[in-house]
Amino acid sequence: MMSEPALPAWARDDAFPIHPDTSKFGVVDHSRISRSFESLDELKAHLEVGKGRLDWVWTPKSDRLVAPEEIPKLAGSLKKRCLIFAAEDVDYARRTAPLTGIAVLYGLYCFLNGISPFGFPGIQFLVLTIFGFLYFTARPWWEARKGRAAANYLTRDQISDQVPEARFELWMENQSTPFSVLFLVLVVLVGGAQFATPGLGISEAGLVKPRYLAGENWRLFTAVFLHGNLIHFILNMSALWYLGRRVEILARWPHLAGAFFLSIIGAGWATVSWLPNQTSVGVSGVICGLLGFLLVFETLHRSLLPRSARRRLAGILVSLIVIGTLGFKFVDNAAHLGGLVTGAIYAFVVFPRSSSPHRPMILKRDLAIGLVGIFLIGASAIGAIFMMVIRVL
């Protein structure tokens, strides 16, 4: 058995908090609300109801909270819970299918007849309706399918195989990521300024290629904080939050800042080179940079996280390819590829291959990279706001 220092942070006994000293058994849900029980049967009964998202449980065997999958006697209850959620997902998919299906058909009709509904070009509206179908109908159906498949492994003999990923995901969710929050706040602030100055944001601070090539080099850095529409903004924010937190937690905050800023440059140069006449905005090039960084970093640090947890990045990469293929007429695939390659190269250059289960230490060099990156990213966001506000004044 490996000693504590030889284990990754999420696998150690002290990875989770000490449980409340209120009863022998209990649960803590995703809202950090705890419920106490005096017997294992009461705990099982609560789990089998299937209400709310469950994070931790506690039993007399440990003084700390643990993942539910760590208690073999809960396997049957967790299986019932999993099947309840799967049934709810199927029901949700069935209820949304008529609406999202009609929306896709209407989008196809508009595209074939040259109609621009709600101000969107036909192809863009069609792709948006397809995304809506995938998110509100196909996604819950797929989650239900995965849930039913996962339930087959929730037996007392097989549940131990689920423990590493369960602990890793719980540990990740409960890590503090102040710099990911900072970067999201910067994007929100610039988005607010863009909303407050309608019609000016993209022209004044976006990557308008002819003006960039004419000498307005700063546009390469300000454009990433702008977005084409609300849907574009929301999708990018959710992806930036997930990938940014993952980079900050696993590789440490200086490399989040470094990968973020270098991806701005890599994505910008790629889109200027390949699409010199198309205006570009959005942080998706940076998002792809963080994805490329993680794909390389997690490959070089295989002992840092469970193998099953790495598969999610492959799913994100496939989704990126699908989005780029469906929306090739308005998705900046050049920026996406440029960011992806830049992030991957950064991780490959900075990190050697390691068999250690520990996260890398922050060296003086890393600290310098992080501080410079944060300064330049912050200056870029402030510059974007300034260019929009000064025009109004």
Image (tube, grey):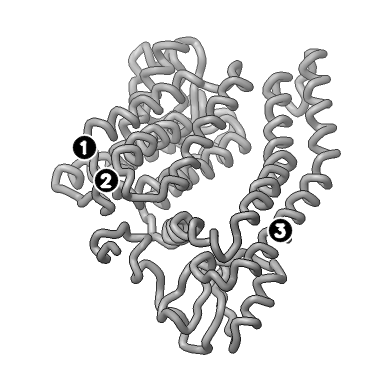
What's the residue type where badge 2 is placed? Pro
Q: Position of residue 303 (x, y in %)?
A: 32, 48
| Residue located at (53% from left, 38% from top) | 236
Q: Closest to the observer: 116 or 26?
A: 26
The tag earlier along the polypeptide, 1 or 3, is 3
Mark 1 crowd level (few <14, some 14–19, many ≥20, 10 Å Cα)? few
Mark 1 or 3, which is nearer the eye?
3
Q: Position of residue 202 (x, y in %)?
A: 51, 26
Tell me: 89 left or right of 101.
left
User: Residue under circle 3?
Assistant: 83
What's the residue type where badge 3 is placed? Leu
Mark 1 or 2, which is nearer the eye?
1
The tag earlier along the polypeptide, 3 or 2, is 3
Q: Residue furthest left?
A: 364
| Residue located at (35% from left, 24% from top) | 266
Tell me: 85 left or right of 19.
right
Instruction: Label 2, secondary structure: give it.
Output: helix
| Residue located at (69% from left, 30% from top) | 128
What's the residue type where badge 1 is placed? Pro
User: Residue under circle 2?
Assistant: 254
